[in-house]
Image (cartoon, rainbow, N blue to C red):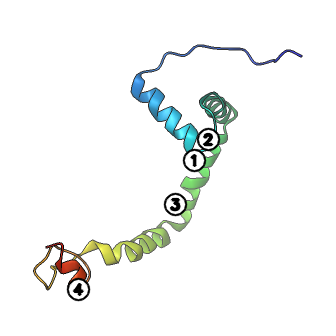
Amino acid sequence: MSSTKKPTQVRLEEGVLAAGKEAATARGLDFNRYVERLIVEDTTGARAAGTAAAQRLIDQHGAFLDDLERQLDGPYADPQPCSGGGTVCSRPCGPAQARFR
């Protein structure tokens, strides 16, 4: 039985190829299947639909998302100097941290 898929050749810069292979691996796909999915998403409008949905979410709930981001980033936003004279951190310096001064 013959395949309906046609072989192609694409010339990519080394960095682009490496990034594509890394992205494919992260998604559990081989490189060819990853490229195939990108093309399908782009040509069927799936990517545009996802982007539009994300923009609607931001438009409708942007203030909530901004507030949530501030709350989650709060503990890391204003680090205090280490009381033990060590590096700047957001936690009090104890014996374990003092070793790294």
Can you give x and y, in whole percent of width and height, for residue 98 in the image?
A: 17, 80
Gap between marks 1 and 2 measured at Cα: 6 Å
Residue picked out by circle 3: 58
Gap between marks 4 and 3 measured at Cα: 37 Å
Q: Is residue 99 above or below residue 18?
A: below
Q: Does any portion of residue 68 appear in the rendered image?
A: yes
Image quarter in which the C terminus is found:
bottom left
Gap between marks 3 and 2 measured at Cα: 17 Å
Can you give x and y, in whole percent of width and height, for residue 54 in the image?
A: 57, 54
Residue picked out by circle 2: 47
Q: State which quadrant residue 4 falls in.
A: top right
Q: Residues within 10 Å of mark 3 (few under 14, many from 20)?
A: some
Q: Going from the N terminus, do you reach mark 1 or mark 3 first?
A: 1
- Which amino acid is tagged 4? Pro
- Which amino acid is tagged 2? Arg
Residue picked out by circle 4: 92
- Which amino acid is tagged 1? Thr
- Which amino acid is tagged 3? Ile
Q: Residues within 10 Å of mark 4 (few under 14, many from 20)?
A: few
Gap between marks 4 and 1 measured at Cα: 43 Å
Asked if the residue under mark 3 is in contact with the one under mark 1, i.e. CB atoms within 8 Å, the reply is: no
Residue picked out by circle 1: 51
Q: Is residue 76 left or right of residue 60?
A: left
